[in-house]
Image: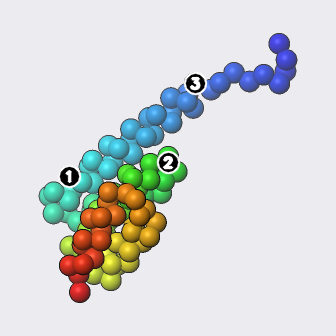
Amino acid sequence: MSSDYHAPDMRQASGIRFVGERNEAAFDRAVELVAQLRYEEAAGEFLPLIEMFEEDGKNNRAAETMFWLAYCSEKQDQKTKAVRLYKELVRKYPDAPASRNASDRLSRLP
């Protein structure tokens, strides 16, 4: 056997799946916080997930996460921040289903 051969690290391969599942569970918890009207806590959960979903190539989920972050900002009377996030979502993920929702929210904000 050549000394250049490296066996696949199964811990790392299975860890990728675990991280993805953990991100989904964190997303679900954050949505539950929104349902409980705990917007500040939910925003804190959503914020790091955007980048994590992007890194995993899950752009639709990243867009959905950004939508919820903007929604939480809106509900906390942080309208300027909400508008900025909705606009960024529409620009960055124009084909994502969440982009249509963001455009709708933007049309309702002053």
**Secondary structure found at label 1:** helix
Where does residue 84 sit, x and y in percent of width and height?
Answer: 38, 78
Q: CA distance from mark 3 to mark 1?
A: 33 Å
Please, what is the three-letter code of the amino acid marked with disc 1? Glu
**Secondary structure found at label 2:** loop
Mark 3 nearby-residue class (10 Å; few <14, some 14–19, many ≥20) = few
Q: Is residue 52 above or below residue 25?
A: below
| Mark 3 or 1, nearer chain start | 3
Q: Residue at x 48, y 57 (%)?
A: 51
Asked where in the image residue 6 lies, by quadrant, the reply is: top right
As drawn, which residue projects farthest toward the right? 2
**Secondary structure found at label 3:** helix
Quadrant location of the N terminus? top right
The nearer-to-camera label among 3 and 2 is 2
Please, what is the three-letter code of the amino acid marked with disc 2? Gly
Q: CA distance from mark 3 to mark 2?
A: 21 Å
Where does residue 68 sit, x and y in percent of width and height?
Answer: 29, 62
Q: Nearer the viewer, residue 7 or 56?
A: 56
Find disc 2 in the rendering and name its residue. 57
Quadrant location of the C terminus? bottom left
| Mark 3 or 2, nearer chain start | 3
Q: Is residue 33 above or below residue 85?
A: above
Q: Nearer the viewer, residue 16 or 44?
A: 16
Mark 2 nearby-residue class (10 Å; few <14, some 14–19, many ≥20) = few
Q: Residue at x 21, y 56 (%)?
A: 33
Q: Residue 32: which disc?
A: 1
Where does residue 83 sit, x and y in percent of width and height?
Answer: 33, 78
Q: Residue at x 20, y 73 (%)?
A: 75
Please, what is the three-letter code of the amino acid marked with disc 3? Met
Mark 1 nearby-residue class (10 Å; few <14, some 14–19, many ≥20) = few
Where does residue 82 sit, x and y in percent of width and height?
Answer: 31, 76
